[in-house]
Every structure is written in C-alpha cells, then in structure tokens.
C-alpha cells in the first residue's frame, strides 16, 4: 500500500475471560465503569465503559482466575486522577482498598521504562495495567549502581512488572541484612513498604506486619521534603490492610 494512502480509522478493544460475569461487573461498577451491554445467552458476554476506556468480557466455566495470564494496557493522560477515582470507588464498595488476592489494586509509581502506572486485577484474574507515558525513552533503564537504589529498582520490577513478589522479597531481605552499608531514610521507607506489600501478597502476615510497623517508624523520621518525595510509597503504606 502506498504510504500516502489514508488509513482506516480503527480502535482496539480487549475481550477478556472470566468464570462468571457478575463478580467482574460488580468490580468495574465499583470503579465507576458503566455496564453498557450484557447478555446471558447464547454466551455470557458484557461490555463496561469509563470515558473512552472500553473492556469486554466473556464467561468461560473452565477459566481459572488464579491461573489467568490475561492482561491489557490502558494509556491515559491523567493516571493520578484515575488512580484516586478507582481507589475511592473500591474503598466505598469494599470498605477498604483491596491490595492482595482477587480483586486487588497495586501502587501507583514511576517505572524505569518511562511510564507512571498502576496494576489492578479483577475477579476474573485479568490484570489491567493503567499508565501515562512520562518519558520518550520506553526502554528499560539500567539498574543504578548504588546498592540500595539498585535493590529498589530490581525489587520493584519483580513486584510490579513481573508480578513475582517472592523474587522481590528475596532482593529486599538480602539488602536489609547488610551490615557494611546503610540505606538513606527514604530508601529504608521504600524498601520496608515494598517488603510489607509483597509479604501480604504472599500470605505472610507476620512478616507483613513487622515490615509495616518498621516502615511506619521510618516514615515518622522523614522530613516534609522527604515525605513529599515518597508520597506514592506513603499512600501504599496507608492502604495495606492487616487483619
């Protein structure tokens, strides 16, 4: 085709699986989505919309949400506002911010590959990545050379890109056991907050509680300028729920 030929307008819409529709629809309704279409037969199917975001779902009895690899990316120009709206909706619907299990919403953070994003996973096990491009360079940046900055870089990738909380836990535990070097107060707060987060994802409530308490103590020692630099981490620490 000639490169000057006008291309047809197109839009991509993900169609994601779930075991049953209703829990998924309840989740997206809590986020503020509108259910714009739903059918029960001949096949379970539904559409939800939030502004220009549209997601479609089909029911599949054999689908296992815990083993799901389904995912899609939502690109927005205001990820902070969207994140706060979704958190508020979930808290109103569930009485808390669900940070582990299904459904759940992750932390909002700047990633090393040029996006500011958060991940949320619905009751069907579908991971919806929501982000805003903050850099022209979309390639993974090399890990920093400094010990604790490097640990944070790698642990964050394991926890929030690879969704490997066990891998993130190993990185953090190893660096916090060091005796010849010490993290800065900001680095310590960030490491402990992430450690509490991944511990809860792994069902290790004892470690999660200990790390949470240590992170809260570390946060109390920060200056106002330091607290502003870790506002995403402090928001995440506040969201962590322990029974």
Image: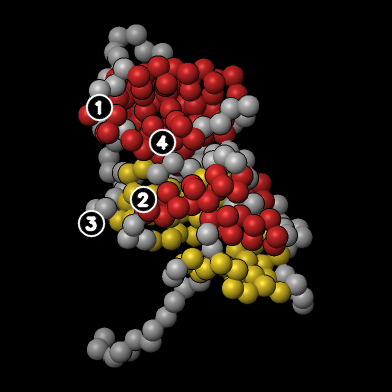
Quote the CA–CA distance across marks 1 and 2.
21 Å
User: Label 2's element?
Assistant: helix
Q: Residue at x 76, y 58 (%)?
A: 62
Check contact, mark 1 vs mark 3: CB within 8 A: no
In the orientation shown, which residue stands out farthest toward the front? 92
Figure check: 217 above or below 8: above
Label 4 sits on residue: 235
Quote the CA–CA distance across marks 4 and 3.
27 Å
Quote the CA–CA distance across marks 3 and 2.
19 Å
Label 2 sits on residue: 80
Quote the CA–CA distance across marks 4 and 2.
12 Å
User: Label 4's element?
Assistant: helix
- Which sits earlier in the primary sequence, circle 1 or circle 3? 3
Number of numbered tags placed on the structure image: 4
Figure check: 58 above or below 155: below
Task: Say which mark, if any, is on residue 224.
Answer: 1
Q: Which residue is drawn at 39% across and 84% down?
A: 9
From the viewer's perspective, is the residue at label 4 or at label 3 nearer?
4
From the viewer's perspective, is the residue at label 3 or at label 2 nearer?
2
Figure check: 114 above or below 152: below
């Amino acid at each position: 085709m000639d490169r000057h030929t006008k291309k047809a307008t197109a839009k991509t819409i993900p169609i994601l699986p779930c075991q049953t529709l209703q829990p998924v629809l309840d989740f997206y309704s809590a986020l503020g989505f509108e259910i714009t279409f739903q059918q029960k037969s001949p096949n379970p199917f539904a559409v939800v919309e939030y502004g220009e975001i549209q997601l479609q779902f089909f029911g599949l009895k054999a689908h296992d949400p815990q083993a799901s690899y389904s995912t899609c990316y939502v690109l927005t120009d205001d990820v902070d506002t969207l994140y706060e709206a979704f958190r508020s909706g979930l808290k109103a619907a569930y009485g808390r911010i669900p940070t582990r299990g299904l459904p759940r919403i992750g932390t909002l953070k700047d990633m090393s590959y040029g996006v500011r994003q958060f991940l949320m996973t619905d009751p069907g096990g579908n991971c919806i990545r929501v982000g805003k491009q903050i850099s022209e360079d979309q390639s993974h940046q090399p890990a920093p050379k400094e010990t604790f900055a490097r640990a944070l870089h790698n642990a964050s990738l394991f926890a929030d890109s690879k969704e490997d909380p066990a891998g993130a836990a190993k990185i953090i535990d190893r660096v916090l056991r060091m005796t010849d070097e010490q993290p800065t107060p900001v680095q310590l707060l960030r490491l402990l907050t992430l450690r509490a987060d991944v511990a809860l994802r792994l069902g290790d409530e004892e470690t999660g509680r200990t790390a949470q308490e240590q992170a809260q103590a570390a946060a109390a020692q920060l200056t106002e300028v330091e607290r502003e630099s870790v506002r995403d981490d402090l928001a995440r620490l506040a969201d962590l729920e322990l029974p």
